[in-house]
Amino acid sequence: MELWIPITIGAALAQNFRFMLQKHLKATRLSTGGATFARFLYSAPLVAVLLWGYVSLGDHSLPQTSGRFWIFALIGALSQILATMCVVALFSERNFAVGITFKKTEVLQTAMVGFLVLGETISTGALLAMVVGFVAVVLLSDPPKGSGVSGIGRFFNRASGLGVLSGILFAFSAVGYRGASLSLGDLDFFLRSCFTLSCVTASQTVAMALWLSWREKGEIGKVLRNWRIGTLVGVTSMLGSLGWFTAFTLQNAAYVKALGQVELIFSFLATVFIFKEKTTGREILAMVLLCLSILLLILLK
């Protein structure tokens, strides 16, 4: 089995736990911006310590950066902030599993952005797997019954809009991070991943702190007061992000994102057994199709 496969699955599991914690923060304590900021604030120091330890114990040197690195890294960082805010806001529109699934429109978008920006292509088999996954997402575009939405609004509504927008932004984020990591040259892949992640999380923490200080005064204090859950958010964020960054360094970002749809299984289990939320037959069918797309990707890539 190629190394990027178990790394991606582990990243998806950690990310699912992080979204669960952020959903809790959003529902009970913090604003969308505050719940998003908690992710970066509590993970940035952990990533910095991990990088320092790896460099020191492994007798490595920090990579030399270039303008290309910072362009890719900062575009990825900003896109990820906005995408995360979209997902956290989406939790107020649909249940947890569907919220995560809407985000999966990023798979085809990542393939397109990766081709346009990095010139990376995908196989016909992988494209088929991604199309199956996209069909599943389309099945989820209807709002819940009783919502009063009909006609064209059944496909163009706030929930689907937030989901698709988050997918576009996550696509730019993934390609940006892969581009940044590749720009560091032929170095140890984990060093490139960890260094890129450290630079990104530090910039995201500063950017979010400035934004909240300007637009949501007092929210930073709330994030600090909820340090217990915030710390868990930081740990799961670090583990998930490190997994994603490492997988992006090793493999085409579109393939990584496609396999990352395994997160759907984790989110479905969370929906049923933790949040006690109901799912419809349409949603279950969509999830089955997404699981099928994962199998096709592994078999046909």
Image: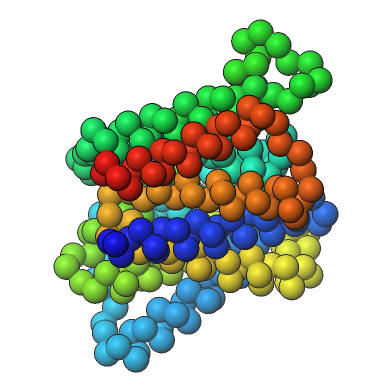
Task: Depth check: give the residue in front, 101 or 299.
Answer: 299
Percent of width and height locating residue 138: 53, 25
Whether residue 61 is visible, yes or no, is: yes
User: Which residue occupies 33% across, 60% down?
Assistant: 4
Percent of width and height locating residue 176: 35, 50
| Coloring basis for residues | rainbow
Task: Depth check: give the residue in front, 26 or 2.
Answer: 2
Q: Quadrant of residue 56?
A: bottom left
Q: Quadrant of residue 196?
A: bottom left
Whether residue 217 is visible, yes or no, is: no
Percent of width and height locating residue 76: 41, 50
Q: In which quarter of the image is the N terminus?
A: bottom left
Q: In this view, does 168 lie to the left or right of 193?
A: right
Query: How many callouts does the rendering have?
Result: 0
In the picture shown, does residue 268 fall above or below 106? below
User: Which residue occupies 18% across, 65% down?
Assistant: 185
User: Which residue occupies 45% across, 58% down?
Assistant: 9
In the picture shown, does residue 162 fall above or below 237? above
Q: Please identify the residue farthest to the left as the structure is shown.
A: 186
In the picture shown, does residue 161 fall above or below 91? above
Percent of width and height locating residue 202: 49, 66
User: Which residue occupies 30% across, 88% down?
Assistant: 58
Q: Quadrant of the C terminus?
A: top left
Q: Is residue 201 left or right of residue 172?
A: right
In the picture shown, does residue 68 fall above or below 106? below
